[in-house]
Amino acid sequence: MAQQRVMRLRINGKEHPLALDARVTLLDALREHADLPGAKKGCDHGQCGACTVHIDGERVLSCLTLAAQAEGHEITTIEGLAGADETLHAVQAAFLRHDAFQCGYCTPGQIMSAVACINEGHANSDDEIREYMSGNICRCGAYPFIVAAVREAAQQLQQEQTA
Ligand code: FES
Ligand code: FES
Protein backbone atom coordinates (compact mmCIF):
# COMPACT_ATOMS: atom_id res chain seq x y z
CA MET A 1 0.00 0.00 0.00
CA ALA A 2 1.19 3.49 -0.83
CA GLN A 3 2.62 5.47 2.00
CA GLN A 4 0.40 7.90 3.77
CA ARG A 5 1.25 10.74 6.05
CA VAL A 6 -0.81 13.22 7.96
CA MET A 7 -1.14 16.49 6.09
CA ARG A 8 -2.49 19.50 7.91
CA LEU A 9 -4.67 21.37 5.51
CA ARG A 10 -6.16 24.69 6.55
CA ILE A 11 -9.52 24.89 4.81
CA ASN A 12 -12.06 27.69 5.29
CA GLY A 13 -10.25 28.81 8.44
CA LYS A 14 -10.20 25.36 10.05
CA GLU A 15 -7.33 22.90 10.46
CA HIS A 16 -7.99 19.49 8.87
CA PRO A 17 -5.41 16.80 9.72
CA LEU A 18 -5.84 14.22 6.95
CA ALA A 19 -3.96 10.96 6.41
CA LEU A 20 -3.21 11.13 2.69
CA ASP A 21 -1.13 9.42 0.04
CA ALA A 22 1.45 11.85 -1.35
CA ARG A 23 -0.17 11.65 -4.80
CA VAL A 24 -3.65 12.73 -3.70
CA THR A 25 -4.86 15.87 -5.44
CA LEU A 26 -6.27 18.77 -3.50
CA LEU A 27 -9.62 18.13 -5.23
CA ASP A 28 -9.79 14.54 -4.01
CA ALA A 29 -8.57 15.55 -0.55
CA LEU A 30 -11.42 18.05 -0.29
CA ARG A 31 -14.10 15.81 -1.74
CA GLU A 32 -13.14 12.37 -0.45
CA HIS A 33 -11.34 13.13 2.78
CA ALA A 34 -12.42 16.52 4.16
CA ASP A 35 -16.14 16.08 3.51
CA LEU A 36 -16.26 19.19 1.32
CA PRO A 37 -17.85 18.10 -1.96
CA GLY A 38 -18.61 21.63 -3.22
CA ALA A 39 -15.63 21.71 -5.59
CA LYS A 40 -16.58 19.50 -8.54
CA LYS A 41 -14.67 17.13 -10.79
CA GLY A 42 -15.71 17.74 -14.38
CA CYS A 43 -12.56 16.49 -16.11
CA ASP A 44 -9.65 16.00 -13.65
CA HIS A 45 -7.34 17.36 -16.38
CA GLY A 46 -7.41 21.12 -15.88
CA GLN A 47 -9.80 21.74 -18.73
CA CYS A 48 -13.19 22.61 -17.22
CA GLY A 49 -12.65 24.74 -14.11
CA ALA A 50 -15.31 22.97 -12.04
CA CYS A 51 -12.69 22.26 -9.37
CA THR A 52 -11.62 25.91 -8.89
CA VAL A 53 -10.80 26.85 -5.28
CA HIS A 54 -8.61 29.54 -3.74
CA ILE A 55 -5.18 29.13 -2.23
CA ASP A 56 -4.16 32.26 -0.33
CA GLY A 57 -6.92 34.10 -2.18
CA GLU A 58 -5.75 33.12 -5.67
CA ARG A 59 -7.81 30.83 -7.89
CA VAL A 60 -6.29 27.43 -8.65
CA LEU A 61 -7.47 24.26 -10.32
CA SER A 62 -7.56 21.81 -7.44
CA CYS A 63 -7.44 18.80 -9.81
CA LEU A 64 -3.95 19.91 -10.90
CA THR A 65 -2.76 20.75 -7.38
CA LEU A 66 -1.44 18.14 -4.99
CA ALA A 67 -2.83 18.32 -1.47
CA ALA A 68 0.79 18.41 -0.31
CA GLN A 69 1.36 21.66 -2.22
CA ALA A 70 -1.47 23.30 -0.30
CA GLU A 71 -0.02 22.52 3.12
CA GLY A 72 0.76 25.66 5.06
CA HIS A 73 -1.56 27.76 2.89
CA GLU A 74 -5.09 29.09 3.31
CA ILE A 75 -7.50 27.06 1.21
CA THR A 76 -10.96 28.46 0.55
CA THR A 77 -13.76 26.45 -1.03
CA ILE A 78 -17.30 27.40 -1.98
CA GLU A 79 -18.40 26.14 1.45
CA GLY A 80 -16.29 28.83 3.12
CA LEU A 81 -17.39 31.79 1.01
CA ALA A 82 -20.50 32.87 2.92
CA GLY A 83 -20.04 34.90 6.09
CA ALA A 84 -19.95 33.29 9.53
CA ASP A 85 -23.64 34.22 9.92
CA GLU A 86 -24.30 32.51 6.55
CA THR A 87 -24.83 35.79 4.69
CA LEU A 88 -24.11 35.00 1.07
CA HIS A 89 -21.04 36.52 -0.57
CA ALA A 90 -21.98 39.25 -3.06
CA VAL A 91 -21.09 36.93 -5.97
CA GLN A 92 -23.26 34.11 -4.62
CA ALA A 93 -26.20 36.47 -4.18
CA ALA A 94 -25.73 37.90 -7.69
CA PHE A 95 -25.68 34.38 -9.22
CA LEU A 96 -29.05 33.72 -7.56
CA ARG A 97 -30.54 37.04 -8.68
CA HIS A 98 -29.42 36.56 -12.29
CA ASP A 99 -30.19 32.83 -12.63
CA ALA A 100 -26.52 32.32 -13.48
CA PHE A 101 -26.76 28.54 -13.16
CA GLN A 102 -28.98 25.71 -14.22
CA CYS A 103 -27.73 22.24 -13.19
CA GLY A 104 -25.33 23.88 -10.72
CA TYR A 105 -22.39 21.57 -11.40
CA CYS A 106 -20.07 24.23 -12.78
CA THR A 107 -21.35 26.82 -10.31
CA PRO A 108 -18.97 26.41 -7.34
CA GLY A 109 -16.04 26.74 -9.74
CA GLN A 110 -17.66 29.66 -11.56
CA ILE A 111 -18.27 31.49 -8.29
CA MET A 112 -14.77 30.90 -6.87
CA SER A 113 -13.32 31.99 -10.20
CA ALA A 114 -15.57 35.08 -10.30
CA VAL A 115 -14.54 36.18 -6.81
CA ALA A 116 -10.88 35.95 -7.84
CA CYS A 117 -11.58 37.58 -11.21
CA ILE A 118 -13.07 40.59 -9.41
CA ASN A 119 -10.21 40.73 -6.88
CA GLU A 120 -7.69 40.60 -9.73
CA GLY A 121 -9.35 43.69 -11.23
CA HIS A 122 -10.45 41.76 -14.32
CA ALA A 123 -14.16 42.56 -14.18
CA ASN A 124 -14.27 46.01 -15.74
CA SER A 125 -16.29 45.17 -18.86
CA ASP A 126 -18.36 42.31 -20.23
CA ASP A 127 -15.57 41.42 -22.66
CA GLU A 128 -12.99 41.34 -19.90
CA ILE A 129 -15.25 39.22 -17.70
CA ARG A 130 -15.84 36.80 -20.58
CA GLU A 131 -12.11 36.50 -21.21
CA TYR A 132 -11.08 36.05 -17.59
CA MET A 133 -13.94 33.63 -16.87
CA SER A 134 -13.20 31.55 -19.97
CA GLY A 135 -11.43 28.86 -17.94
CA ASN A 136 -14.79 27.81 -16.50
CA ILE A 137 -16.97 25.78 -18.83
CA CYS A 138 -20.77 25.67 -18.48
CA ARG A 139 -22.60 23.02 -20.47
CA CYS A 140 -25.95 24.59 -19.54
CA GLY A 141 -24.97 27.73 -21.42
CA ALA A 142 -25.51 30.13 -18.53
CA TYR A 143 -22.72 32.41 -19.78
CA PRO A 144 -24.78 35.59 -20.43
CA PHE A 145 -26.28 35.38 -16.95
CA ILE A 146 -22.89 34.61 -15.39
CA VAL A 147 -21.42 37.73 -17.02
CA ALA A 148 -24.34 39.82 -15.74
CA ALA A 149 -23.93 38.42 -12.22
CA VAL A 150 -20.18 39.01 -12.14
CA ARG A 151 -20.59 42.56 -13.47
CA GLU A 152 -23.19 43.41 -10.84
CA ALA A 153 -21.24 41.85 -7.98
CA ALA A 154 -18.07 43.65 -9.08
CA GLN A 155 -19.88 47.01 -9.09
CA GLN A 156 -21.43 46.30 -5.71
CA LEU A 157 -18.11 45.30 -4.15
CA GLN A 158 -16.42 48.36 -5.63
CA GLN A 159 -19.09 50.64 -4.17
CA GLU A 160 -18.70 48.99 -0.77
CA GLN A 161 -14.94 49.52 -0.92
CA THR A 162 -15.22 53.21 -1.73
CA ALA A 163 -18.12 53.86 0.67
S1 FES B 1 -11.86 19.03 -12.78
FE1 FES B 1 -10.24 20.44 -12.63
S2 FES B 1 -10.33 21.55 -14.45
FE2 FES B 1 -11.85 20.03 -14.71
S1 FES C 1 -25.01 25.33 -14.77
FE1 FES C 1 -24.88 23.35 -15.66
S2 FES C 1 -22.87 23.26 -16.38
FE2 FES C 1 -23.07 25.31 -15.76
Image (tube, rainbow, N blue to C red):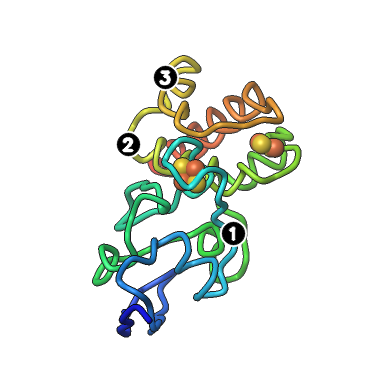
Q: Where is mark 3, residue-wise?
A: 128
Q: Is residue 113 left or right of residue 152?
A: left
The verdict on label 1 being within 8 Å of ligand 1 is no
Q: Where is mark 1, residue-wise?
A: 38
Q: Is residue 91 left or right of residue 20?
A: right
The amino acid at mark 1 is Gly
Could you say where residue 145 lies in the image, as x and y percent from the top left? 66, 26
Secondary-structure class at tag 2: loop
Identify which residue is drawn at 32% across, 85% down: 6
Q: Looking at the picture, does residue 113 appear above or below residue 81?
A: above
* Mark in front: 3 vs 1: 1
Identify which residue is drawn at 46% across, 59% down: 27
In front: 63, or 8?
A: 63
Identify which residue is drawn at 68% across, 28% down: 142
C-alpha gap between disc 3 and disc 1? 26 Å
Could you say where residue 141 lies in the image, as x and y percent from the top left? 68, 25
Could you say where residue 74 lies in the image, as x and y percent from the top left? 32, 65
